[in-house]
Image (cartoon, rainbow, N blue to C red):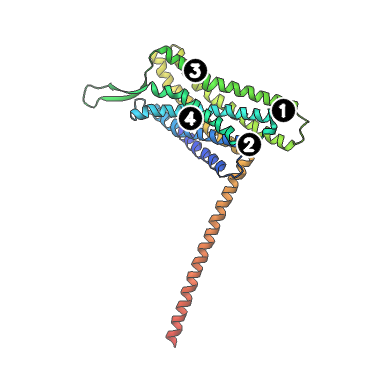
Amino acid sequence: MGFAYSIIFLVCLVGNMIVCVMIVKSKRTSSATDYFIFNLAVCDLLVGIFCIPFTFVKHVFPVLSLGPFACKFIPLAQGVAVGASVFTLMAIAYDRYRLVIHPSKNKAPVKYWSCILSGVWVSAISIMVPQAVVRAEIIHNMLPAPGGDIKVCQEFWPSYTQQQAYSAALLACCYLGPLVISACLYLMVAITLRRRRGTNNTMHASQRFNKVTKMLVIVIVLFTLSWIPLYTCWMVEDFGGLTPQEKLTLHDYVYPFAHWLAFSNSCVNPLLYGYFNKSLRKRFRDSLVRRSDNEITGGNLSLKIKANVNRKAILKYRRKSNKLNK
């Protein structure tokens, strides 16, 4: 699995960094959808930074601990990245719905999307705080000899019932709830657009809107499918009454693939943006063209400087030769 994790790690970082840079550098970025896509790319970047490498290391070295701070902070950062991602998908669905119901309010004010994005991050942090609270680094005495102690980062819940309640809350708030709401919003968008078919004079704008909406629906569908195995593992572990041996099998053979599939969603999104978003592709091509032009211009300037230096050296040599001949 090491090679598979390495691939999604690189694609996730490079792809989402390109999306962020292209949106930031664009002077025409004024729609709320652009800001939401930027926020989703940031969430995917955080998944690439905190989730992919640390989860892989945990699968390879289950008892490895990186210190008390990392024991609390890394799970919190992982949860916030995933939670903010799904909340952003829900915010995008609402924005699509708003544009259909109120087409005259196409250009949203800065206050609109900034408030929504602030709510996304505040909600994600609030829901994931227990991830840090219940974790602590403990010492296991594995060997009687000196140096036989092993530090392990573990969860400590006041009761098993509270752990189950929190797992169910995560499933409802960070998976089922946002996805059901998003699906309902997109269904209403589709129904409204179907009713308006043939009455819209701006056919080109309508087609572009439909294409962007289609891209965002595919993003949600892929998110749903990618995360089903991991959420299923969590629910089975917390509610399935597994034996210790069955839990060990789940962690050794099922979780590594379930985590990889879930995190791979974060490297698929920028590929979808590039395929469906013509504006983003054009920005990327323009950036490459400008860079190429700058390199060519710089090369020509360097050649001109070298030519001038050589010409001056030749003239100086000729003047010295003429003086000697005289």
Sequence-wise, which precedes: disc 4 or disc 1?
A: 4
- Under mark 1, the amino acid is Leu
The residue to which callout 4 is attached is 81
Label 3 crowd bin: few (<14), some (14–19), many (20+), radius 10 Å? some
Element under label 1? helix
Q: Position of residue 138 (x, y in %)?
A: 31, 22
Q: Position of residue 199 (x, y in %)?
A: 78, 31
Residue 22 circle label? none
Q: Residue at x 53, y 22 (%)?
A: 175
- Under mark 4, the amino acid is Ala
Image quadrant where residue 246 sits:
top left
80 sits left or right of 116 in the view = left
Sequence-wise, which precedes: disc 2 or disc 4?
A: 4
The residue to which callout 3 is attached is 169
- Under mark 3, the amino acid is Ala
Mark 4–mark 1 Cα distance, whole angstroms, equals: 33 Å
Sequence-wise, which precedes: disc 4 or disc 3?
A: 4
